[in-house]
Amino acid sequence: MDLGQGFGNVEGKLGGGGFEMPPCTGYPFRVVDVKDTTNKKGSPMLEIYLDIAMGDYEGAFEKFPKIQYVPYGDEAGRARLKGTLDLIIGQNKAMFPEDDVFANGTFDEQRLIGCVTGGVLKWDTYNGKNYLKINYLCTPEEAQKAKVIPEPAISETAKAPAQSSGGTGNGWGFGNN
């Protein structure tokens, strides 16, 4: 790739032009992708990719959706998965007309794509930078009641580069959700 003369002197910027991070609060989220995968320990896990569905920040995470991880390799995990699926399906009954979507003991997770649910963001810190991540899912009505949480100050200790085994987090919450 030819980057031209003087490229080494260009000031690098992340986040893109004019992008404004949404406030840390509750939002209606749309499921934009779902992956049935495994975690680092080899246990089954559902990754639910979400973007803000409406309002001033609709599509704010279009290129880098927020991910809700739902491990379900043990009994407690299966209970969390069932609760998450019941929440999303219950808010999108028109997309699930059958009485029992789990009747045969299987579920096509791709059917969740396009569903809308509520969720609340929270601040987290990675490599000395704040980023937003999904704290929990809820109904859109519950999400509307969430208070705005201001971005926390980062201590000097947290700003020091952490020893990492990899990852692509860039401080905007994209890459490591």
Image (tube, rainbow, N blue to C red):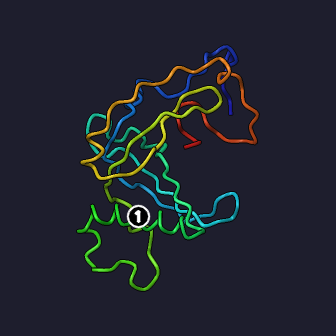
Q: Nearer the viewer, residue 75 or 27?
A: 75
Q: Position of residue 168 (x, y in %)?
A: 64, 39
Based on the displayed image, in which of its 4 quarters is residue 111 positioned? bottom left
Residue at 60 percent across and 68 percent down: it is 73
Q: Quick one: which residue is furthest to the front in this view?
A: 76
Q: Position of residue 57 (x, y in %)?
A: 32, 36
Based on the displayed image, in which of its 4 quarters is residue 124 positioned? top right
Q: Which quadrant holds the C terminus?
A: top right
Seen in the picture, residue 170 relative to 72 is either above or below; the reply is above
Seen in the picture, residue 85 relative to 124 is either above or below; the reply is below
Residue at 26 percent across and 38 percent down: it is 55
Could you classify mark 1 by the number of other residues whose Cα lies within 10 Å: few (under 14), some (14-19), or many (20 or more)? few
Q: Quick one: which residue is furthest to the bottom in this view?
A: 104
Residue at 28 percent across and 79 percent down: it is 98
Residue at 59 percent across and 42 percent down: it is 176
Total marks placed: 1
Q: Which residue is mark 1?
A: 83
Q: Specify the amino acid type for callout 1.
A: Gly
Q: Nearer the viewer, residue 4 or 157?
A: 157
Q: Position of residue 163 (x, y in %)?
A: 76, 34
Q: Which quadrant holds the N terminus?
A: top right
Q: Name the side, left or right, on which 105 lies relative to 167.
A: left
Q: Secondary structure at mark 1?
A: helix
Q: Position of residue 25 (x, y in %)?
A: 36, 36
